[in-house]
Image (cartoon, rainbow, N blue to C red):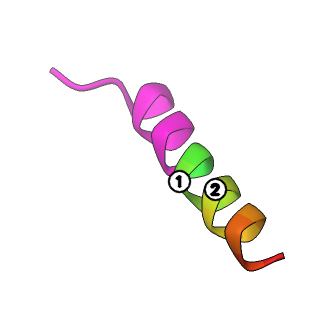
Amino acid sequence: MFNIITLNNVIYQAFSNILYEEY
């Protein structure tokens, strides 16, 4: 069973990485 908090954390990290690359 996958934890939603963990999934949200992974998505947040990926989004932050994209923003960092674009910025």
- Where residue 6 is drawn, which disc sits there? none
Q: Position of residue 2 (x, y in %)?
A: 23, 26
Most distant residue in the right direction = 23
Residue, disc 2: 17
Across and down, in percent, residue 4 comes to 40, 33
- Callout 2, which amino acid? Asn
Horizontal relation, residue 21 to residue 15: left or right: right
Which residue lies at the image location 51% right of the left edge and 42% below the top edge? 8
Residue at which label 1 appears: 14
**Residue 1 spot, x, y in % from top left:** 15, 20
* 8 within the magenta span: yes
Q: Choose between 11 and 3: the one closer to the eye.
A: 11
Q: Magenta-highlighted stretch: main secondary structure?
A: helix
* Position of residue 20 measured from the top left corner of the image (x, y, whole percent): 76, 62
The answer to whether mark 2 and mark 1 are in CB contact below 8 A is: yes
Identified by mark 1, the residue type is Ala
Q: Residue furthest left?
A: 1
- Secondary structure beneath dot 1 equals helix
Magenta run includes residue 2: yes
Q: Is residue 7 left or right of residue 18?
A: left
Q: Is residue 11 above or below residue 1?
A: below
Task: Using residue 12 as the reference point, say whether residue 22 is left or right of it.
Answer: right
Residue ID at (40%, 37%): 7
Q: Which secondary structure, mark 2?
A: helix
Report the number of numbered marks: 2
**Image height of 11 relative to 6, above or below:** below
Query: Quick one: 19 or 10, which is closer to the camera?
Result: 19
Tell whether 20 sits left or right of 9: right
Instruction: Locate residue 19: give its quadrant.
Output: bottom right
Which residues make up the magenta segment? Answer: 1-11
